[in-house]
Image (cartoon, rainbow, N blue to C red):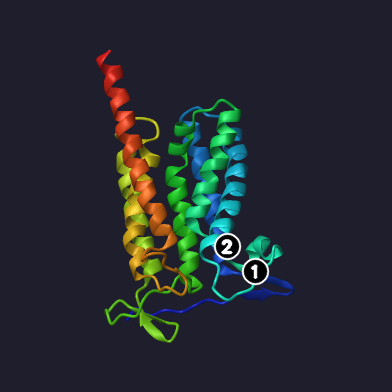
Amino acid sequence: MIPYRIFPMFHLGFLNFNIYGIMFALGTLIAILMAVKEAKKRSIPKDNIYDLSFYLLIGMLVGARLFYVLFYWPKGMPLSFFDIFKVWEGGLAFFGGLIGAVIAGYFFLRKHNLDFWVYADIFTMPLIVGHIFGRVGDYLTGGHPGKITNLPWAIYTDNALRHPVVLYEIIGLFAILGIIYFLKKKNYFEGFLFLSYLILYSIQRLFLDVFRIESTDPRFLGLTPSQYVTLIMIAVGFYAIARFKFKKTQTEAV
């Protein structure tokens, strides 16, 4: 069994601090700084990154909350219109945040006549690093408990030995980060890093959701809402890569 401890919210005077919130904020800050550094290498103004980051954050929060409310809201819990906006009480879904950020980023970049795929690649590694920080926050606060197991690396939470699902995801994200770092050196075409990340993380999440408990990750026809999204992401990712590769081949032939 892996030693495990959940860190509750702590207080400093009249201020309340949540470990997840701290890790989320720290991960966001580091991700933005990483994106600025990468943009500098490409001679892209840092103000573009700061402005885009603002829209990405808004899109992410809106998308993550709506996805959670629509698909993960606990059964039997009352839901009022104002409850939708109470993000400080928890309840954000990663894929909803990703979709919301992509939509917001797309419209911002289109408005300013900037290449979507260039900026998607710039933010790929920062996105993964920020995601890791968020999942560390989940792990420290007991988020996403797994199914009961007797495996030697189980953690004791919710009155049972369970799969450390969040720990699995953190390890997988580090592996994906390493793969993306390697692919970055290849420089196949703009958008390749982001599309590769979509495919790799979606495959990982497709399998990891098998170990999540249904009380926090409900099933619809046997799959979680996130698993349905992963299937779409995998298909879109492979289709886009094949299309880009075909265009590149045609260009080189000409």
Inter-mark Cα distance, 1 to 2:
9 Å
Q: Position of residue 133 (x, y in %)?
A: 48, 59
**Can you identify the residue that label 1 sits on?**
79
Q: Quadrant of the N terminus?
A: bottom left
Determine the residue located farthest toward the top in the rendered image. 254
Q: Nearer the viewer, residue 208 or 217?
A: 217
Hey, which quadrant is residue 228 in on the image? bottom left
| Residue at far left of view | 253
Residue 148 % position (x, y): 34, 80
First in residue order: circle 1 vs circle 2: 2
The type of residue carrying mark 2 is Val
For residue 45, above or below residue 233: above
Identified at 38% across, 48% down, the residue is: 232
Up the image or down, 127 lies above or below 108; here it is below
Describe residue 215's horizontal placement relative to residue 84 as left or right: left
| Residue at 44% from the left image edge and 58% from the top image edge | 132
**Which circle marks residue 248 in the picture?**
none
Q: Which residue is mark 2?
A: 69
> Mark 1 near mark 2, Cβ–Cβ under 8 Å?
yes
Measured as percent of width and height from the top left, residue 101 is found at: 54, 46
Residue 201 visible within the image:
no
Give x and y (percent) for residue 227: 38, 58
Q: Amino acid at mark 1?
A: Leu
Q: Residues within 10 Å of mark 1 (few under 14, many from 20)?
A: few
Q: Quadrant of the C terminus?
A: top left
Q: Dot 1: what SS? A: loop
In the orientation shown, which residue stands out farthest toward the front?
221
Seen in the picture, residue 112 relative to 6 is either above or below; the reply is above
